Image (spheres, rainbow, N blue to C red):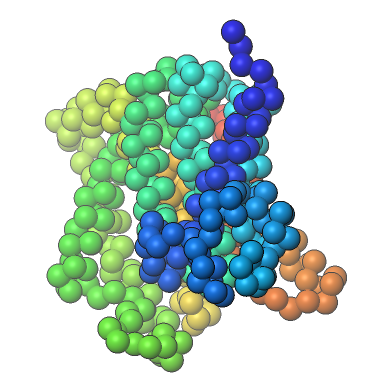
Protein backbone atom coordinates (compact mmCIF):
# COMPACT_ATOMS: atom_id res chain seq x y z
CA UNK A 1 0.00 0.00 0.00
CA UNK A 2 1.35 3.40 -0.98
CA UNK A 3 2.34 5.73 1.85
CA UNK A 4 0.15 8.88 1.88
CA UNK A 5 1.97 12.00 0.70
CA UNK A 6 1.28 13.91 3.91
CA UNK A 7 3.21 11.32 5.92
CA UNK A 8 6.27 11.81 3.71
CA UNK A 9 5.91 15.58 4.03
CA UNK A 10 5.59 15.47 7.80
CA UNK A 11 8.39 12.96 8.35
CA UNK A 12 10.81 14.68 5.99
CA UNK A 13 10.20 18.11 7.51
CA UNK A 14 10.41 16.77 11.09
CA UNK A 15 13.61 14.87 10.35
CA UNK A 16 15.16 17.92 8.72
CA UNK A 17 14.21 20.07 11.72
CA UNK A 18 15.94 17.61 14.06
CA UNK A 19 19.05 17.77 11.87
CA UNK A 20 18.75 21.56 12.04
CA UNK A 21 18.82 21.33 15.84
CA UNK A 22 22.11 19.44 15.58
CA UNK A 23 23.43 21.99 13.07
CA UNK A 24 22.83 24.69 15.69
CA UNK A 25 25.15 22.75 17.98
CA UNK A 26 27.72 22.50 15.19
CA UNK A 27 27.49 26.23 14.39
CA UNK A 28 28.07 27.21 18.01
CA UNK A 29 30.53 24.59 19.22
CA UNK A 30 32.69 23.57 16.26
CA UNK A 31 34.50 26.90 15.69
CA UNK A 32 34.99 27.22 19.45
CA UNK A 33 36.63 23.76 19.52
CA UNK A 34 34.04 22.27 21.85
CA UNK A 35 32.72 18.71 21.76
CA UNK A 36 29.61 18.19 19.66
CA UNK A 37 28.45 15.41 21.99
CA UNK A 38 29.14 16.55 25.55
CA UNK A 39 28.07 18.32 27.66
CA UNK A 40 24.30 18.31 26.97
CA UNK A 41 22.73 21.50 25.66
CA UNK A 42 22.51 24.26 28.24
CA UNK A 43 21.58 27.93 28.43
CA UNK A 44 24.66 30.08 27.76
CA UNK A 45 23.42 32.63 30.33
CA UNK A 46 22.56 30.51 33.40
CA UNK A 47 24.30 27.25 32.30
CA UNK A 48 21.22 25.22 33.27
CA UNK A 49 20.77 22.07 31.20
CA UNK A 50 17.95 22.33 28.71
CA UNK A 51 15.32 19.63 29.32
CA UNK A 52 14.12 17.49 26.45
CA UNK A 53 10.70 19.16 26.26
CA UNK A 54 12.42 22.53 25.89
CA UNK A 55 14.63 21.19 23.12
CA UNK A 56 11.99 20.20 20.57
CA UNK A 57 12.96 21.72 17.21
CA UNK A 58 10.97 24.83 16.22
CA UNK A 59 8.14 24.24 18.73
CA UNK A 60 10.14 24.82 21.92
CA UNK A 61 11.44 28.19 20.73
CA UNK A 62 7.90 29.29 19.86
CA UNK A 63 6.40 28.01 23.12
CA UNK A 64 9.11 29.73 25.19
CA UNK A 65 8.78 32.89 23.07
CA UNK A 66 12.53 32.83 22.50
CA UNK A 67 13.46 32.93 26.20
CA UNK A 68 15.15 30.54 28.62
CA UNK A 69 12.60 28.90 30.92
CA UNK A 70 14.92 29.29 33.91
CA UNK A 71 16.55 32.74 33.66
CA UNK A 72 14.38 34.33 30.96
CA UNK A 73 17.45 35.29 28.94
CA UNK A 74 16.77 35.74 25.23
CA UNK A 75 17.45 32.76 22.96
CA UNK A 76 18.83 33.82 19.61
CA UNK A 77 16.28 33.53 16.77
CA UNK A 78 19.09 31.82 14.83
CA UNK A 79 18.12 28.53 16.50
CA UNK A 80 14.56 28.79 15.23
CA UNK A 81 15.68 29.97 11.77
CA UNK A 82 18.23 27.15 11.28
CA UNK A 83 15.76 24.47 12.38
CA UNK A 84 13.01 25.82 10.14
CA UNK A 85 15.38 26.34 7.21
CA UNK A 86 16.81 22.83 7.48
CA UNK A 87 13.35 21.28 7.70
CA UNK A 88 12.23 23.18 4.60
CA UNK A 89 15.47 22.25 2.84
CA UNK A 90 14.99 18.53 3.47
CA UNK A 91 11.39 18.82 2.31
CA UNK A 92 12.37 20.83 -0.75
CA UNK A 93 15.04 18.29 -1.71
CA UNK A 94 12.49 15.47 -1.50
CA UNK A 95 10.09 17.41 -3.70
CA UNK A 96 12.84 18.26 -6.20
CA UNK A 97 14.01 14.69 -6.70
CA UNK A 98 10.82 12.67 -6.35
CA UNK A 99 7.83 14.92 -7.07
CA UNK A 100 8.66 17.97 -9.20
CA UNK A 101 10.04 16.35 -12.35
CA UNK A 102 12.75 19.05 -12.50
CA UNK A 103 15.46 16.38 -12.21
CA UNK A 104 15.09 13.67 -14.82
CA UNK A 105 16.02 10.01 -14.40
CA UNK A 106 15.92 9.91 -10.60
CA UNK A 107 14.84 6.41 -9.52
CA UNK A 108 12.21 5.92 -6.83
CA UNK A 109 13.26 6.46 -3.24
CA UNK A 110 13.42 2.72 -2.50
CA UNK A 111 14.90 1.90 -5.93
CA UNK A 112 18.17 3.68 -5.17
CA UNK A 113 16.99 7.26 -5.10
CA UNK A 114 17.53 7.30 -1.35
CA UNK A 115 21.30 7.48 -1.89
CA UNK A 116 21.02 10.56 -4.10
CA UNK A 117 18.68 12.19 -1.59
CA UNK A 118 20.93 11.31 1.35
CA UNK A 119 24.12 12.71 -0.13
CA UNK A 120 22.37 15.87 -1.30
CA UNK A 121 20.89 16.64 2.12
CA UNK A 122 24.33 16.00 3.65
CA UNK A 123 25.75 18.60 1.27
CA UNK A 124 22.90 21.04 1.97
CA UNK A 125 23.34 20.56 5.73
CA UNK A 126 27.05 21.26 5.34
CA UNK A 127 26.25 24.44 3.42
CA UNK A 128 23.83 25.61 6.13
CA UNK A 129 26.33 24.95 8.93
CA UNK A 130 29.23 26.52 7.02
CA UNK A 131 27.20 29.60 6.12
CA UNK A 132 26.00 30.00 9.70
CA UNK A 133 29.55 29.93 11.02
CA UNK A 134 30.87 32.11 8.21
CA UNK A 135 28.21 34.76 8.85
CA UNK A 136 29.15 34.95 12.52
CA UNK A 137 32.91 34.45 12.56
CA UNK A 138 34.05 34.84 8.91
CA UNK A 139 35.51 31.34 8.83
CA UNK A 140 34.50 28.01 7.31
CA UNK A 141 35.71 25.02 9.37
CA UNK A 142 37.60 22.72 7.03
CA UNK A 143 36.40 19.67 8.97
CA UNK A 144 32.87 20.21 7.62
CA UNK A 145 34.19 20.38 4.06
CA UNK A 146 36.35 17.29 4.47
CA UNK A 147 33.43 15.32 5.93
CA UNK A 148 31.16 16.25 3.02
CA UNK A 149 33.93 15.52 0.50
CA UNK A 150 34.60 12.05 1.92
CA UNK A 151 30.90 11.13 1.87
CA UNK A 152 30.56 12.48 -1.66
CA UNK A 153 33.40 10.30 -2.95
CA UNK A 154 32.02 7.23 -1.15
CA UNK A 155 28.48 7.84 -2.43
CA UNK A 156 29.74 8.24 -6.01
CA UNK A 157 31.47 4.86 -5.71
CA UNK A 158 28.43 3.17 -4.16
CA UNK A 159 25.98 4.82 -6.57
CA UNK A 160 26.38 2.32 -9.46
CA UNK A 161 25.74 -0.51 -6.99
CA UNK A 162 22.28 0.77 -6.03
CA UNK A 163 21.26 2.63 -9.21
CA UNK A 164 21.59 1.88 -12.89
CA UNK A 165 24.89 3.28 -14.19
CA UNK A 166 23.14 4.38 -17.37
CA UNK A 167 20.79 6.55 -15.28
CA UNK A 168 23.69 8.05 -13.32
CA UNK A 169 25.63 9.03 -16.42
CA UNK A 170 22.65 9.74 -18.67
CA UNK A 171 20.98 12.13 -16.22
CA UNK A 172 24.11 13.32 -14.37
CA UNK A 173 22.81 12.14 -11.00
CA UNK A 174 26.28 11.64 -9.51
CA UNK A 175 29.80 12.41 -10.74
CA UNK A 176 31.36 9.89 -13.12
CA UNK A 177 34.32 9.64 -15.47
CA UNK A 178 31.78 9.87 -18.29
CA UNK A 179 31.42 13.62 -18.82
CA UNK A 180 29.69 14.63 -22.06
CA UNK A 181 32.16 13.93 -24.89
CA UNK A 182 35.30 14.31 -22.74
CA UNK A 183 37.42 11.18 -23.02
CA UNK A 184 37.12 8.99 -19.94
CA UNK A 185 40.84 8.44 -19.96
CA UNK A 186 41.38 12.19 -19.54
CA UNK A 187 39.39 12.36 -16.31
CA UNK A 188 40.90 9.11 -15.00
CA UNK A 189 44.47 10.28 -15.60
CA UNK A 190 43.95 13.80 -14.22
CA UNK A 191 42.18 12.49 -11.12
CA UNK A 192 44.84 9.87 -10.37
CA UNK A 193 47.70 12.29 -10.97
CA UNK A 194 46.18 15.11 -8.91
CA UNK A 195 45.41 12.73 -6.05
CA UNK A 196 49.01 11.47 -6.01
CA UNK A 197 50.22 15.08 -6.07
CA UNK A 198 47.94 16.03 -3.19
CA UNK A 199 49.29 13.16 -1.08
CA UNK A 200 52.86 14.27 -1.79
CA UNK A 201 52.07 17.90 -0.98
CA UNK A 202 50.48 16.90 2.33
CA UNK A 203 53.53 14.81 3.22
CA UNK A 204 55.88 17.68 2.36
CA UNK A 205 53.75 20.02 4.44
CA UNK A 206 53.81 17.61 7.36
CA UNK A 207 57.60 17.29 7.13
CA UNK A 208 57.99 21.05 7.05
CA UNK A 209 59.58 21.05 3.59
CA UNK A 210 56.64 23.16 2.39
CA UNK A 211 55.56 25.89 4.78
CA UNK A 212 51.93 26.48 5.68
CA UNK A 213 50.45 29.76 4.51
CA UNK A 214 49.09 32.16 7.13
CA UNK A 215 50.71 30.10 9.86
CA UNK A 216 49.57 30.95 13.39
CA UNK A 217 52.26 30.21 16.03
CA UNK A 218 51.20 28.25 19.09
CA UNK A 219 50.25 30.40 22.03
CA UNK A 220 49.00 33.27 19.89
CA UNK A 221 46.16 34.94 21.80
CA UNK A 222 44.93 37.32 19.14
CA UNK A 223 45.34 36.22 15.54
CA UNK A 224 44.28 39.67 14.34
CA UNK A 225 47.56 41.09 15.62
CA UNK A 226 49.60 38.92 13.24
CA UNK A 227 50.97 40.67 10.16
CA UNK A 228 51.33 38.83 6.86
CA UNK A 229 52.66 39.65 3.42
CA UNK A 230 49.70 38.32 1.42
CA UNK A 231 51.64 37.90 -1.83
CA UNK A 232 54.32 35.90 -0.01
CA UNK A 233 51.66 33.69 1.55
CA UNK A 234 50.26 33.00 -1.91
CA UNK A 235 53.70 31.88 -3.06
CA UNK A 236 53.60 29.26 -0.31
CA UNK A 237 50.24 28.06 -1.60
CA UNK A 238 51.57 27.93 -5.16
CA UNK A 239 54.42 25.72 -3.91
CA UNK A 240 51.84 23.45 -2.27
CA UNK A 241 49.93 23.18 -5.55
CA UNK A 242 52.93 22.48 -7.80
CA UNK A 243 53.07 18.69 -7.11
CA UNK A 244 49.32 18.44 -7.70
CA UNK A 245 49.45 20.29 -11.01
CA UNK A 246 52.69 18.63 -12.12
CA UNK A 247 51.58 15.06 -11.44
CA UNK A 248 48.15 15.67 -12.99
CA UNK A 249 49.80 16.85 -16.20
CA UNK A 250 52.35 14.03 -16.03
CA UNK A 251 49.67 11.38 -15.58
CA UNK A 252 47.80 12.78 -18.54
CA UNK A 253 50.93 12.78 -20.74
CA UNK A 254 51.50 9.12 -19.88
CA UNK A 255 48.29 8.32 -21.78
CA UNK A 256 50.49 8.20 -24.89
CA UNK A 257 52.11 5.02 -23.62
CA UNK A 258 50.03 1.98 -24.72
CA UNK A 259 50.38 0.08 -21.44
CA UNK A 260 49.46 3.10 -19.33
CA UNK A 261 46.59 3.91 -21.67
CA UNK A 262 45.27 0.39 -21.29
CA UNK A 263 45.66 0.61 -17.50
CA UNK A 264 43.59 3.79 -17.34
CA UNK A 265 40.87 2.27 -19.53
CA UNK A 266 40.75 -0.87 -17.39
CA UNK A 267 40.18 1.23 -14.28
CA UNK A 268 37.27 3.09 -15.90
CA UNK A 269 35.49 -0.20 -16.60
CA UNK A 270 34.82 -0.68 -12.90
CA UNK A 271 31.64 1.27 -12.17
CA UNK A 272 32.65 2.07 -8.59
CA UNK A 273 36.05 3.35 -9.73
CA UNK A 274 34.44 5.51 -12.41
CA UNK A 275 32.24 7.06 -9.73
CA UNK A 276 35.06 7.64 -7.26
CA UNK A 277 37.38 9.18 -9.87
CA UNK A 278 34.57 11.31 -11.27
CA UNK A 279 33.87 12.62 -7.78
CA UNK A 280 37.56 13.32 -7.19
CA UNK A 281 37.70 15.19 -10.50
CA UNK A 282 34.71 17.30 -9.43
CA UNK A 283 36.49 18.01 -6.14
CA UNK A 284 39.64 19.27 -7.85
CA UNK A 285 37.67 21.38 -10.33
CA UNK A 286 35.74 23.03 -7.48
CA UNK A 287 38.94 23.72 -5.56
CA UNK A 288 40.85 24.90 -8.64
CA UNK A 289 38.32 27.56 -9.64
CA UNK A 290 38.29 29.27 -6.26
CA UNK A 291 41.97 28.67 -5.45
CA UNK A 292 43.01 30.12 -8.78
CA UNK A 293 40.83 33.19 -8.14
CA UNK A 294 42.24 33.49 -4.62
CA UNK A 295 45.86 33.38 -5.79
CA UNK A 296 45.49 35.62 -8.84
CA UNK A 297 43.33 38.12 -6.94
CA UNK A 298 45.82 38.34 -4.10
CA UNK A 299 48.77 38.84 -6.45
CA UNK A 300 46.84 41.52 -8.34
CA UNK A 301 45.57 43.54 -5.38
CA UNK A 302 48.10 42.67 -2.67
CA UNK A 303 45.33 41.65 -0.27
CA UNK A 304 43.95 38.19 0.48
CA UNK A 305 41.17 37.48 -2.02
CA UNK A 306 38.61 34.87 -0.91
CA UNK A 307 39.23 32.51 1.95
CA UNK A 308 40.76 29.07 1.99
CA UNK A 309 37.50 27.80 3.48
CA UNK A 310 35.74 28.85 0.27
CA UNK A 311 38.20 26.67 -1.66
CA UNK A 312 37.35 23.57 0.36
CA UNK A 313 33.63 24.35 0.36
CA UNK A 314 33.53 24.41 -3.43
CA UNK A 315 35.67 21.29 -3.59
CA UNK A 316 33.26 19.44 -1.29
CA UNK A 317 30.29 20.49 -3.43
CA UNK A 318 32.15 19.53 -6.61
CA UNK A 319 32.68 16.02 -5.24
CA UNK A 320 28.89 15.62 -5.08
CA UNK A 321 27.40 17.64 -7.94
CA UNK A 322 30.27 17.26 -10.43
CA UNK A 323 32.62 19.58 -12.34
CA UNK A 324 30.23 21.41 -14.70
CA UNK A 325 27.58 22.35 -12.10
CA UNK A 326 30.24 23.49 -9.61
CA UNK A 327 31.82 25.68 -12.29
CA UNK A 328 28.40 27.18 -13.03
CA UNK A 329 27.80 27.74 -9.30
CA UNK A 330 30.94 29.86 -9.10
CA UNK A 331 29.62 32.21 -11.79
CA UNK A 332 26.08 32.29 -10.37
CA UNK A 333 27.22 33.20 -6.84
CA UNK A 334 28.21 36.82 -7.71
CA UNK A 335 24.60 37.57 -8.70
CA UNK A 336 23.52 36.80 -5.14
CA UNK A 337 26.36 38.96 -3.85
CA UNK A 338 25.30 41.78 -6.15
CA UNK A 339 21.68 41.49 -5.01
CA UNK A 340 22.83 41.77 -1.40
CA UNK A 341 24.96 44.82 -2.20
CA UNK A 342 22.05 46.55 -3.94
CA UNK A 343 19.73 45.81 -1.02
CA UNK A 344 22.29 47.28 1.37
CA UNK A 345 22.44 50.45 -0.72
CA UNK A 346 18.65 50.66 -0.86
CA UNK A 347 18.21 50.27 2.89
CA UNK A 348 21.34 52.36 3.59
CA UNK A 349 23.01 49.64 5.60
CA UNK A 350 26.73 48.90 5.59
CA UNK A 351 26.93 45.39 7.02
CA UNK A 352 29.33 43.25 5.03
CA UNK A 353 29.02 39.48 4.98
CA UNK A 354 31.49 36.80 3.84
CA UNK A 355 31.32 35.16 0.44
CA UNK A 356 30.61 31.61 1.66
CA UNK A 357 26.80 32.07 1.85
CA UNK A 358 26.74 33.40 -1.72
CA UNK A 359 28.71 30.38 -2.93
CA UNK A 360 26.25 28.16 -1.06
CA UNK A 361 23.30 29.82 -2.80
CA UNK A 362 25.03 29.31 -6.14
CA UNK A 363 25.52 25.63 -5.35
CA UNK A 364 21.87 25.18 -4.34
CA UNK A 365 20.78 26.86 -7.56
CA UNK A 366 22.86 24.44 -9.61
CA UNK A 367 21.45 21.43 -7.77
CA UNK A 368 18.01 22.59 -8.85
CA UNK A 369 18.88 23.40 -12.48
CA UNK A 370 21.38 20.57 -12.91
CA UNK A 371 19.67 19.22 -16.03
CA UNK A 372 19.47 22.68 -17.59
CA UNK A 373 23.21 23.18 -17.10
CA UNK A 374 24.09 20.01 -18.98
CA UNK A 375 21.51 20.70 -21.68
CA UNK A 376 23.08 24.15 -22.15
CA UNK A 377 26.57 22.73 -22.60
CA UNK A 378 25.30 20.03 -24.95
CA UNK A 379 23.58 22.63 -27.11
CA UNK A 380 26.40 25.19 -26.90
CA UNK A 381 29.30 22.86 -27.57
CA UNK A 382 27.57 20.09 -29.43
CA UNK A 383 28.66 17.61 -26.79
CA UNK A 384 27.16 14.16 -26.72
CA UNK A 385 28.06 10.83 -25.19
User: Number of numbered discs present?
Assistant: 0
- Residue at (64% x, 64% y) in the render: 69
Residue with the most extreme right position: 346
Q: Is 320 located above or below residue 298 in the figure? A: above
Quarter occupied by the N terminus: top right
Residue 60 horizontal side relative to residue 320, left or right: right
Residue with the most extreme front position: 70
Q: Where is residue 191 shown, x and y percent of the image?
A: 30, 43
Q: Where is residue 227 shown, x and y percent of the image?
A: 41, 90
Q: Foreground residue, 189 or 316?
A: 316
- Residue at (55% x, 45% y) in the render: 18
- Residue at (58% x, 50% y) in the render: 53
Q: Is 128 located above or below residue 380 in the figure? A: below
- Residue at (44% x, 59% y) in the render: 40
Q: Where is residue 342 shown, x and y percent of the image?
A: 79, 67
Residue 196 horizontal side relative to residue 184, left or right: left
Q: Is 64 located above or below residue 276 in the figure? A: below
One can see residue 197 in this view: yes
Q: Foreground residue, 164 or 371?
A: 164
Q: Foreground residue, 112 or 325?
A: 112
Q: Where is residue 12 shown, x and y percent of the image?
A: 59, 33
One can see residue 331 in this view: no
Amino acid sequence: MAVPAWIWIFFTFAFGSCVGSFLNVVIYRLPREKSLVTPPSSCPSCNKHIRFYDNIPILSWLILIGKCRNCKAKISPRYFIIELLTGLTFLGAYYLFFESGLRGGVPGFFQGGWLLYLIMVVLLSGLIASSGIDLELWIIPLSICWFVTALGIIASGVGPLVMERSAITGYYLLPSTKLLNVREITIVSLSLGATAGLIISLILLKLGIIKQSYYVPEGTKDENELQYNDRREMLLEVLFLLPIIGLAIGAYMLCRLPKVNSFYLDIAQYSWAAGVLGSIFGYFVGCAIVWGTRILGTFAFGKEAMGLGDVHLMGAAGAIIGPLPIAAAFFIAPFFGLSWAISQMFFKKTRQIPYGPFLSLGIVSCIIINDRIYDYFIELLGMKY
